[in-house]
Structure formats: C-alpha cells, structure tokens
Amino acid sequence: TPTAVPKCDAKQTDVILVLDACCFTDASFADNFVKLLDFAGNYTEQFDLGPDDVQFGAVVFGNSPLRVFDLKDFSNHTKMTQAIGEAPALRGTLRTNKAFDLVASDMFSVAKGGRENASKIVILMTDSPSADLAD
C-alpha cells in the first residue's frame, strides 16, 4: 500500500517546469506526453503554493518554447494541475536551448511573478536528447 508523501517545507522558491512537448511520429508519444503532464502536475502537489511559499511557472518546448503559465498565475493546486494537463504538444525538433533562453530572459522576472529573494529552480523533464544547433 503506498504511503502519502509529506509536503515539502520549502519557502520562497520560484520553480519553472520545462516540459518536452515535441511531437514525433512515434505512436507512443501521446501516452508518454500525458504521463509527463500527469507527473508534472502530481509533483507540484507536494508543495505549499503562494507568495510566501512555492510558485511554479511552466514552459513546453519543441522547436520553439511556449509559455504555459507564469509564476504569479496560480496559488491553487487544482487550477494549476489543470493548466499543466492542458499544455499543448508541439511539432519540430527538440530545441532545449530555446526553452532555456525563454526561462533565463523572462520567466523569473518580477513582471511574471518572480521574487527577488526567492530561490530559483528550473526542472527539465524530457526523454530525448536536444537537437540544439551551435548558433
């Protein structure tokens, strides 16, 4: 019988989830993408959400990144998990560098809900190597 995992007691932490949403022709892609989104949603439920606790933002990426939501957008697990579950699959090659560029340039900004004194964490969830080009 599984036991409940205690909630993490992290305070003032800004976390950006960077989710591989690259759609290949592999028939198992849809199942694996749903599993990834479920895992990401379940992961966030281990933390207390809010301006004095943990805030999450999310990006999906394939050839280009797409912001799913910002740090300031959710203090409610149900709505955030729903937003993660509705993240779109993307076409193209897996360009991790472009996702990290978006995170570094914008996702932790104060305008997007980033807090100056909060710890900053980026979590990459992927099952494939990047197709980054040296540019």
Image: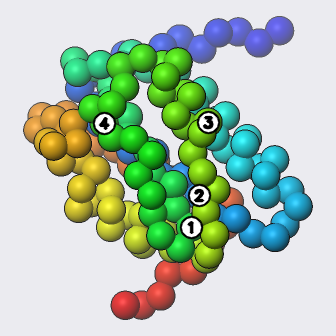
Asked if the residue at tag 1 contacts the one at tag 2, i.e. Cβ–Cβ closer than 8 Å, the answer is yes
Per the image, the residue denoted by label 1 is 62
Sequence-first disc among 2 and 4: 2
**Which of the two discs, 1 and 4, labels the residue nearer the N terminus?**
1
State the residue position of label 3: 85
Q: Quadrant of residue 76?
A: top left
Residue that badge 4 annotates = 71
Under mark 4, the amino acid is Leu
Where is residue 37? Give x, y as percent: 63, 40
Instruction: Identify which amino acid the numbered label 2 is placed on.
Output: Asp
Q: Is residue 42 visible?
A: yes
Q: In the image, what residue occupies the spot 37% across and 64% down?
A: 100
Q: Which residue is drawn at the image coordinates 84% and 66% (left, top)? A: 26
Q: CA distance from mark 3 to mark 2?
A: 13 Å
Depicted 41 relative to depicted 100: above or below: above
> Could you tell me how far apart the alpha carbons at marks 1 and 4 are, in whole angstroms?
21 Å
Where residue 6 sits: x, y (%)?
Answer: 53, 11
Say which residue appears at 27% left-offset and 32% top-offset.
Answer: 72
- Gap between marks 3 and 1 measured at Cα: 17 Å
Which amino acid does the dot numbered 3 rest on? Answer: Gly
Question: Disc 3 vs disc 4: Cβ atoms closer than 8 Å?
Answer: no
Q: Which residue is mark 2?
A: 20
The residue mark sitting in front, 3 or 2, is 3
For this orientation, the residue located farthest to the right is 27
Report the amino acid beneath label 1: Gly
Residue 106 percent location from the top left of the image: 24, 56
